Image (cartoon, rainbow, N blue to C red):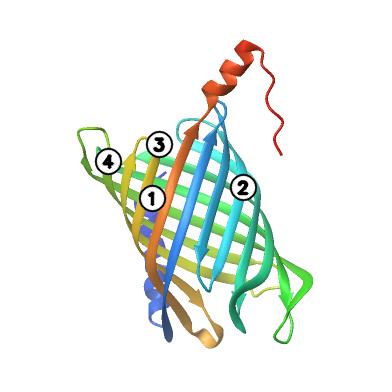
Amino acid sequence: MRPLIVLPVFLISVVGLLAQEDVHDRELWLGYIGSIRVADNWSIWQDYHFVPDAFSVARYGLTYKLNTRVQMTGGLGFVWTSTSFTDKLVRGEYRPWGQIVGQTRLGEKLSGQLRFRYDARFRQKLGEGVVLEEHMFYNRLRAMARVRLDLEQLPNGDVLHLNLMHELLYNAGEQVPNGIDQNRLYLLLGFTHKQYTLLGGYHMRMIPQAAAAMRYNHGLTIWFLHTIDIRHRFKRTIEEDVPLPHGG
């Protein structure tokens, strides 16, 4: 894994896009990304994102850890988006998805990560100013590179770090024009304390429009990453021969 090599390639594509006719807008991106570890190599994935007037996402999955550097996740997501005729999140979508993530150390204070994700998108079709019950289907391929620089390690073990991320999203299918769906760039300051990380900073979403125009959505990103380890609860339950409760 060499994100430092891949990332400049992505950034070169961004520079090319910036030369086109553009429209700028502002937005706020709030997110929660959680992982519940239930076994040594297995965990439950859940993440939620909300960008007012743009989209809302609820995604769930199961993660398998292949080794200390690579893990795979698959699951199902539910998405609501705005449309060209309203800023309300009225267009529904369900999205089977899968991803593989690899990470490595690049130096004493530098680490990198590569993520490849596939989205199978089943989106409601649009009519003349209305959202239809019928769905369209297409594929979306996503590649993200992240570089993290540890700025300071505090006496209690907390870490302050800087994160540069870039994600390229590509559409493919018979019902959509094949090509770049979005470029996303993030510059985030992070604070890690034991089982959680708080990320905050700047993001820009570059979205191709008709007639070779480009839309740039700039904004504030606030993400909360949370890891919960409940392996000991399962081990204790088995040892005491107490049945697991039946949840709703």
Secondary structure category for the residue under label 3: loop
Amino acid on which the number 2 mark rests in the picture: Tyr
Secondary structure category for the residue under label 1: helix
Secondary structure category for the residue under label 2: strand
- Which dot marks residue 195? 3
The location of residue 118, given as percent across then percent down, is: 61, 54
The location of residue 160, given as percent across then percent down, is: 26, 45
User: Which residue does the image show at 73% across and 74% down from the upper left?
Assistant: 125
The answer to whether mark 3 and mark 2 are in CB contact below 8 A is no
Nearer-the-camera pick, 107 or 125: 125
Nearer-the-camera pick, 226 or 151: 226
Q: First in sequence, mark 4 or 2: give its number.
A: 2
Q: First in sequence, mark 1 or 3: give its number.
A: 1
- Which residue is label 4 attached to? 159
Amino acid on which the number 1 mark rests in the picture: Pro
Q: Residues within 10 Å of mark 1 (few under 14, many from 20)?
A: many
Secondary structure category for the residue under label 4: strand
Q: Considering the image in quadrants, where does the C terminus appear?
A: top right
User: Which residue does the image show at 31% across and 46% down from the upper left?
Assistant: 191
Amino acid on which the number 4 mark rests in the picture: Val
Name the mark nearer the viewer: 1 or 3.
Answer: 3
- Which residue is label 2 attached to? 60
